[in-house]
């Protein structure tokens, strides 16, 4: 995550927009908590595995909702500042 943030800050985002996206409000406790949370998960490469019948679905909210992919999109007020299609692009990507 940090590598992607650094790259985007240097090559894509305007400085004012990078400051808005990369930092939090007040004491930034939410950001620190999220960063600590991400350190508990690892991506394990699976090389030369049979992927003909992979199921990426998962459940959330104690199994009450099944998602075909374990990716969710959180609300963000600055979508249009990052891309001309803004929220429409995010919704299309998430569909």
Image: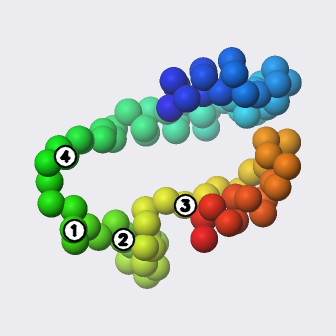
Q: Position of residue 85 (x, y in %)?
A: 82, 55
Residue denoted by label 2: 57
Of label 2 and label 1, which has the lower sequence position? 1
Distance of mark 3 from mark 2, alpha carbons? 12 Å
Q: Earlier in the sequence, mark 4 or mark 3?
A: 4
Label 4 sits on residue? 46
Q: Position of residue 95 (x, y in %)?
A: 60, 71
**In the structure shown, which secondary structural element does the residue marked by tag 2 occupy?**
loop
User: Distance from label 2 to label 4 (Cα)?
Assistant: 18 Å
Q: Which of the 4 image quarters holds residue 31?
A: top right
Q: Nearer the viewer, mark 1 or mark 4?
A: 1
Disc on the earlier residue, 3 or 1: 1
Q: Are there few (<14), some (14-19), or many (20+) residues within 10 Å of tag 3?
A: few
Q: From the viewer's perspective, tell me whether residue 89 is left or right of residue 14.
A: left
Residue wearing tag 3: 72
- Marks 2,4: beta carbons within 8 A: no
Mark 1, residue position: 52
Instruction: Look at the numbered disc 4 and give the secondary structure of its residue.
Output: loop
Specify whether residue 2 is in view. Answer: yes
Q: Secondary structure at mark 3?
A: loop
Residue occupying the point 43% across, 66% down: 69
């Amino acid at each position: 995550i940090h590598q992607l943030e650094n790259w985007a800050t240097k090559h894509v985002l305007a400085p004012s927009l990078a400051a808005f996206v990369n930092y939090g409000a007040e004491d930034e406790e939410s950001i620190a908590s999220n960063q600590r949370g991400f350190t508990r998960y690892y991506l394990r490469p699976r090389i030369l595995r049979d992927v003909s019948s992979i199921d990426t679905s998962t459940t959330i909210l104690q199994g009450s909702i099944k998602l075909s992919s374990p990716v969710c999109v959180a609300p963000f007020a600055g979508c249009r500042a990052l891309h001309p299609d803004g929220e429409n692009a995010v919704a299309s990507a998430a569909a």
